[in-house]
Image: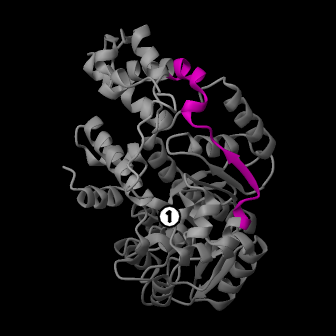
């Protein structure tokens, strides 16, 4: 267990000192308070992982301190020190949210066990809360036997056992997060958390708080302490997706964290050591991003230790039948379509399409087709029109020649407008789904829809 912060509250100086020495020998950092009011003031300025308090104290006693903490939404576990004559009050305190109580005179080993159990339980509570959120998002496994994917598997197995930083590149929808998760599962860190962060989805004003956490009162609305995702990932792997979308000031702070392996919560000057494996990803050319000024050059060299490029779907067409069967099986379970199948003609259309949205687009197309077929037989009529009518790739000689007057920026805007329009059509105008399909934030999609006058 990493170093934790424990607040010791007791009106007897000797008892406070004994408890502090014991906790410091256990490897924890301590602060001390002589009464409940002093302890409450400390919790308003600093964050703690555990409060160890005497039950009977003049003024604000341990029970009143517990009530005050809970009324202020401070979820820090509280252990009470009590004498035999006040056991009933301690039991009442546990009903009000105390973690446990310890009888005086206390046995040092028993106290150490109780403290360790409380800190472990609190960390598990935080991890379980995070895991429940992750499970709700859902994610699948790699599917594919092509030579391109075999190469990916080989690279994952080579890099997973180390602590090396990994940079994953590839187009939108190619499975960059799946690759990061596979690296984590094959590493010695697999028993700890895998914490993904989509840098494109976090508003600039809460970026630092989300990554590094904050203390209560650090900014307007910070009503309680918050553990950042870097602390949550201690001992495990943190995955920074779309790293080029991270604001440049945050990139500078991230670089320092990668160098020093320590963070500071927003509003605090206390440094917290973090033991993490860092995996980052981008759908852009990182060297071009450095040239464009959206990725710091020094950060690029720090993260680009081991590079892994995810192949687009058009480079592994032989995997499409396997992917189709995988997604159909998923939709049979998800949508309750036990008879769901696909015709050879529809499968051929899927194999001849270019798939600009890659595997993610294929999954969305099949889900839509499953609904249109009412869970029966998916045929070409259930696929988007462009996959059926224009699915054969023209040769270079057959491709239309652009007017000489068109500029490259205008051509890019035309293509972007076409992609967004198709995504909106495919999702029946649902901008949240369209944003996921295009791997954009909803805010970015709204801006582009307005820019291009799409409805």
| Residue nearer the viewer, 432 or 262 | 432
Q: Is residue 209 above or below residue 217?
A: above
Which residue has dot 1 on it? Answer: 245
Residue positioned 43% across, 66% down in the render: 93
Instruction: Judge from the rendering whether residue 151 lies leftward or rightward of residue 398; answer left or right.
Output: right
Instruction: Judge from the rendering whether residue 96 lies leftward or rightward of residue 90; answer left or right.
Output: left
| Residue nearer the viewer, 419 or 118 | 419
Is residue 83 visible to us here?
Answer: no
Say how many tags the image has.
1
Verify whether residue 208 appears in magenta: no
| Range of residues picked out in magenta | 301-323
Residue positioned 49% across, 21% down in the render: 351
Q: Quadrant of the N terminus?
A: bottom right
SS for dot 1:
helix
Residue positioned 77% across, 56% down in the render: 164
Instruction: Judge from the rendering whether residue 244 lies leftward or rightward of residue 168; answer left or right.
Output: left
Q: How far across and down, in percent of the image, does residue 259 sit? A: 74, 73
Residue positioned 51% across, 62% down in the render: 99
Q: How far across and down, in percent of the image, does residue 18 sit? A: 72, 81
Q: How far across and down, in percent of the image, does residue 2 sit? A: 70, 65
Find the residue positioned furthest to the left: 455
Is residue 284 visible to us here?
Answer: yes
């Amino acid at each position: 267990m990493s170093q934790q912060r424990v607040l010791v509250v007791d009106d007897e100086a000797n008892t406070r000192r004994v408890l502090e020495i014991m906790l410091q020998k256990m490897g924890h950092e301590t602060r001390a308070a002589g009464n409940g009011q002093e302890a409450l003031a400390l919790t308003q300025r600093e964050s703690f992982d555990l409060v160890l308090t005497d039950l009977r104290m003049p003024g604000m006693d341990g029970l009143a301190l517990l009530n005050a903490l809970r009324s202020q939404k401070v979820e820090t576990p509280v252990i009470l020190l009590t004498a035999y004559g006040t056991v009933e009050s301690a039991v009442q305190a546990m009903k009000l949210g105390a973690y446990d109580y310890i009888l005086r005179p206390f046995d040092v080993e028993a106290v150490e066990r109780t403290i360790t159990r409380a800190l472990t339980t609190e960390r598990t509570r935080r991890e379980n809360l995070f895991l429940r959120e992750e499970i709700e998002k859902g994610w699948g496994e790699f599917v594919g036997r092509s030579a391109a994917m075999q190469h990916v598997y080989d690279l994952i197995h080579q890099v997973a056992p180390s602590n090396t930083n990994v940079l994953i590149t590839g187009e939108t929808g190619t499975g960059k997060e799946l690759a990061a998760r596979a690296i984590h599962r094959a590493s010695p860190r697999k028993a700890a958390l895998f914490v993904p962060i989509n840098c494109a989805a976090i508003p600039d004003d809460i970026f630092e708080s989300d990554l590094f956490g904050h203390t209560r009162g650090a900014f307007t609305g910070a009503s309680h302490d918050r553990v950042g995702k870097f602390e949550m990932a201690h001992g495990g792997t943190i995955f920074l997706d779309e790293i080029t979308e991270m604001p440049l000031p945050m990139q500078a702070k991230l670089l320092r964290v990668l160098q020093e392996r320590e963070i500071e919560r927003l509003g605090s000057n206390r440094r917290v050591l973090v033991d993490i494996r860092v995996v980052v990803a981008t759908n852009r050319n990182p060297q071009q991003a450095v040239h464009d000024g959206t990725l710091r050059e020094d950060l690029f060299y720090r993260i680009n230790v081991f590079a892994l490029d995810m192949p687009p779907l058009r480079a592994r067409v032989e995997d499409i039948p396997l992917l189709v069967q995988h997604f159909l099986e998923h939709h049979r379970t998800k949508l309750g379509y036990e008879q769901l199948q696909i015709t050879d003609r529809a499968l051929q259309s899927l194999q001849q399409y270019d798939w600009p949205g890659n595997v993610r687009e294929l999954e969305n197309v099949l889900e839509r087709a499953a609904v249109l077929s009412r869970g029966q037989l998916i045929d070409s009529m259930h696929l988007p029109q462009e996959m059926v009518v224009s699915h054969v790739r023209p040769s270079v000689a057959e491709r239309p020649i652009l007017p000489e007057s068109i500029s490259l920026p205008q051509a890019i805007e035309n293509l972007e407008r076409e992609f967004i329009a198709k995504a909106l059509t495919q999702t029946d105008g649902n901008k949240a789904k369209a944003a996921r399909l295009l791997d954009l934030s909803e805010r970015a999609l709204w801006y582009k829809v307005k820019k291009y006058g799409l409805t």
